[in-house]
Image: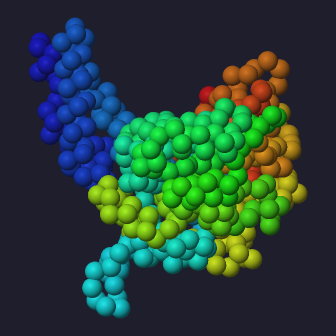
Amino acid sequence: MNPFSQLPSVDRLLAEEQISLMVERHGCALVTNLVRDVLADARSEIKGGGAAPSLATLVARVGAGDTPLSTPKLRPVLNLTGTVLHTNLGRAVLPEEAIAAIVSAARSPCALEFDLQSGGRGDRDEIVNDLLCKITGAEAATVVNNNAAAVFLLLNTLAQKKRVIVSRGELVEIGGAFRIPDIMSRAGAKLIEVGTTNRTHLKGFVAAIDEAPLARTAMLMKVHTSNYSIQGFTHSVAESELAELAHRHGLPMVTDLGSGTLVDFRLWGLPYEPTASEAIAAGADLVTFSGDKLLGGPQAGMLVGKRELIEKIKKNPLKRALRVGKITLAALEAVLRLYLDPDRLPHRLTTLRHLTRTEADIREQTLRLLPGLLEALTELPVNVEVVPLRSQIGSGALPADRLESAGFAIRPKGKRSGVLNLIERRLRHVDYPGRPIIGRIDDGSLLLDLRCLDSVDEDDFLACLAALKAPQ
Ligand SMILES: *Cc1c(COP(=O)(O)O)cnc(C)c1O
């Protein structure tokens, strides 16, 4: 008998009970596609000399597509990696005020580019302009998709076919292939490096300016080397000296701050990171920074500084291609408002709350959750210990500094190192709508750092531990 004729029709498969339930859940179009794919695979198998799969096999193959169809790809997870601003986990977690603003901007039309005073057309930058100026001391501000876009737009507007003088020690690469030299050439600017990797002096900048007719130089630039530090025999030129030199030649001085905090983090016992207002006060004409790093907001790139330069940047047609949407602006406005009341910031800004949690507080939480973890792991050959850990700020910010933290160390009994990978995988494969737990394997232990586990997430954490009991 012709094995092809043994295959059921699409309609026959759709009529199967399990598959018709899938149609109710996901709609006819999606499930019919799935059925066609499964039948096409079966025909290739037959062409390759195989037998026709049975009806039950075909139904099971279609059924295997059920979970992927109903599971979103952008799954919420529990970040127990110990890195607070984890780029691969979406960086800053937004405060409730920003979440509420996002929901209302999404749900209803909003005055995005509409001036409610005059009834005329508005400018979306006006939504955050006053806040950014008040907080940083700048004259004007604009917002784009991320800081990489901010740097690109700045260079493309002010330095096309012109020289940009930067210290060699600041030609950084930020993860994900953002390298300052590449962004410069794509933006059409000509990079002029001065100094050596570890030492740059003002006279290097003076010589670079004097090397070519002044009209060919666009700016002096400073890049905050947020993701690494050079120690030992080092020298760099202070922002104020660089600004003064630039201004003496009628050139602008621009600073890419990267992480860009808006307040001095030392107020809360955290390591020092330069602020946008310090850069402005030191004489920088333009400053760029990210929205979703230490600022604790949505992904965005801020450009703040002299009004005349911001106006030029806003006129670049690429601004239109790099602009942010209403969801981002809603979140950013809400987050920036929190900065107007710095005293309450550590309670209200989620990232800052995570960064400022004390080791004692995290340890107490760890001890509270220990019985649940021990119970979930009883059948696996591992030891669990509550250990001191050191969290990282992440996103390239303050790489050398670590925050005292606490969490669990899960270690295999004896030489069964495979068991750690098994546990790590089970925690990652938690069924939807559970939240996968992401830890880190380090030096023979699976570490779960509880710094970013909010008390409201504890129930989710305990529920996900049930996944550890799955049969092997
Ligand atoms: C992170 C960073 C960037 C890129 O910012 P994104 O918001 O990730 O695009 C650029 N410059 C510096 C110095 C940075 O630290």
Colour scheme used in the picture?
rainbow
Give 5 or 293, whichever is nearer the viewer: 293
Q: Please provide percent x and percent y for residue 214.
A: 46, 48
Q: Residue 50 lies in what quarter of the image?
A: top left
Q: Please provide percent x and percent y for residue 363.
A: 85, 53
The C terminus - image quarter: top right
Give 82 or 30, whichever is nearer the viewer: 82
The N terminus - image quarter: top left
* Relative side of 75 to 378, left or right: left
Tell me what residue is drawn at x 65 percent, y 29 percent: 422
Kindly tell me whether residue 463 is visible in this rendering: no
* Relative side of 405 to 279, left or right: right
Give 278 or 104, whichever is nearer the viewer: 278
Tell me what residue is drawn at x 24 percent, y 45 percent: 30
Tell me what residue is drawn at x 61 percent, y 43 percent: 205
Q: Please provide percent x and percent y for residue 423.
A: 67, 33
Q: Please provide percent x and percent y for residue 233.
A: 80, 34
Residue farthest to the bottom, as pictured = 117
In the displayed structure, 270 sits above or below 69; it is below
Kindly tell me whether residue 40 is visible in this rendering: yes
Tell me what residue is drawn at x 80 percent, y 62 percent: 266
Say how many tags the image has. Answer: 0
